[in-house]
Image (cartoon, rainbow, N blue to C red):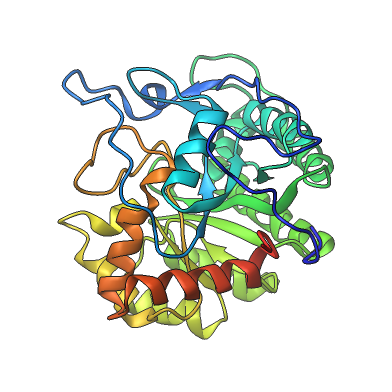
């Protein structure tokens, strides 16, 4: 998207002129991914105090439903606006989600998004069937679809792509090869389109850097939901990458993430939710949405020794640097 575009104002309950009503229903559920623990509190947390300056949630999944009742896209945008969030980038990371995201963006110009074949999805595609044994299209066909979808209206990022040795064993040669092939195809696509790229990196820090070093990283490369320590943060920053922090930076056991954030300062730092996952403290485990970003921004400010206003100003400026949106 052109940096000259203006951002439709996100005010509670409003729709900018020319936008269609958002009628898309989520197609996935958080419970299907992480297991809905019987005692998990599924009530929605209250909206926190608004940020002093607006920021953008640069990675969420509106195709996922959660909570004691699913929030519509309109409701999520309204609550986000109330909390000082003036833009959402929604990510479709499997075939159904990518198609859903493309359709949503074609009908609602308040949002932006990105699509890719998630690394764990790549491993399934290589096997030819999903976890339930249902047939899937070949990996090369899925990447071809992504190549077309990412050129559609509202698409401003290739992602999330990368490597995951947590859910998919690195020792599984077929799965490893599929993830590496998909990662390299997405790197090439990001460079071909000139779009930034968001990386999913779980237990794969060294391999992610090795692939990026070998293939040449896109000019704007974002480590989504940064999961490394201070040393890995410095290795990424030295390469000119951007680090995006989610609600898990507030978790009690996330000293490594806070150390990484302290190492980074506010240089090349972004904020995200990865909603509906990774709900920040004090609401960990409850449903997550973009309106809870103020809790993560408070930790970003604290870990970098900045005021909340300065943290918001710098994070927003970096968002513009990466995505060219929002511009208002």
Is there any visible trace of residue 281 in the rendered image?
yes
Q: Is 216 positioned to the left or the right of 174 in the image?
A: right
Q: Is 187 located above or below residue 277 in the figure?
A: below
Q: Residue at x 51, y 23 (%)?
A: 28
The residue closer to the viewer here, 215 or 17, is 17
Quarter of the N terminus within the rendering: bottom right
Residue at left offset 30%, top offset 54% = 295
Q: Nearer the viewer, residue 328 or 260?
A: 328
Q: Is residue 188 above or below residue 122?
A: below
Residue at image position (58%, 66%) is 319
Residue 148: image quadrant is top right
Instruction: State left or right for residue 232 relative to residue 93.
Output: left
Q: How many numbered marks, from 0 up?
A: 0
Measuring from the top left, give residue 208's x and y in whole percent: 52, 64
Residue 115, visible in the rendered structure: no
Residue shown at 69% from the left, 74% from the top: 219
Q: Is residue 206 above or below residue 152?
A: below
Q: Residue 126 location, x and y as percent?
A: 63, 34
Q: Measured from the top left, where is residue 162 in percent x and y? A: 56, 54
Residue extending farthest to the bottom is 238
The quarter holding residue 305 reads bottom left
Q: Position of residue 270 (x, y in %)?
A: 48, 65
Nearest the viewer among 245 and 217 is 245
């Amino acid at each position: 998207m052109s940096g000259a575009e203006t951002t439709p104002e996100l005010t509670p309950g409003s729709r900018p002129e020319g936008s269609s009503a958002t009628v898309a229903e989520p197609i996935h559920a958080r419970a299907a991914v992480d297991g809905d623990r019987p005692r998990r509190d599924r009530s929605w947390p209250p909206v926190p105090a608004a940020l002093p300056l607006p920021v953008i949630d640069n990675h969420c999944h509106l195709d996922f439903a959660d909570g004691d009742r699913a929030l519509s896209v309109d409701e999520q945008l309204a609550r986000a606006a109330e909390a000082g969030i003036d833009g959402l980038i929604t990510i479709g990371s499997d075939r159904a989600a990518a198609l859903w995201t493309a359709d949503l963006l074609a009908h609602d110009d308040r949002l932006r998004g990105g699509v890719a074949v998630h690394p764990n999805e790549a491993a399934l595609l290589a096997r030819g069937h999903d976890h339930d044994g249902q047939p899937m299209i070949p990996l090369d066909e899925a990447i071809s679809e992504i190549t077309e979808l990412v050129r559609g209206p509202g698409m401003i990022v290739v992602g999330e792509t990368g490597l995951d040795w947590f859910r998919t064993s690195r020792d599984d040669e077929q799965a490893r090869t599929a993830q590496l092939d998909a990662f390299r195809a997405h790197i090439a696509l990001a460079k071909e389109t000139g779009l930034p790229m968001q990386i999913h990196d779980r237990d794969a820090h060294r391999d992610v850097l090795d692939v990026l070093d070998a293939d040449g990283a896109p000019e704007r490369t974002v480590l989504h939901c940064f999961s490394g320590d201070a040393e890995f943060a410095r290795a990424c920053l030295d390469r000119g990458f951007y680090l995006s922090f989610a609600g898990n930076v507030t978790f009690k056991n996330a000293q490594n993430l806070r150390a990484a954030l302290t190492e980074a300062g506010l240089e090349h730092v972004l904020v995200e939710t990865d909603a509906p996952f990774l709900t920040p403290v004090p609401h960990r485990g409850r449903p997550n949405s973009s309106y809870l970003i103020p809790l993560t921004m408070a930790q970003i400010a604290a870990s970098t020794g900045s005021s909340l206003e300065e943290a918001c100003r710098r994070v927003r400026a970096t968002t513009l640097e990466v995505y060219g949106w929002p511009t208002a």
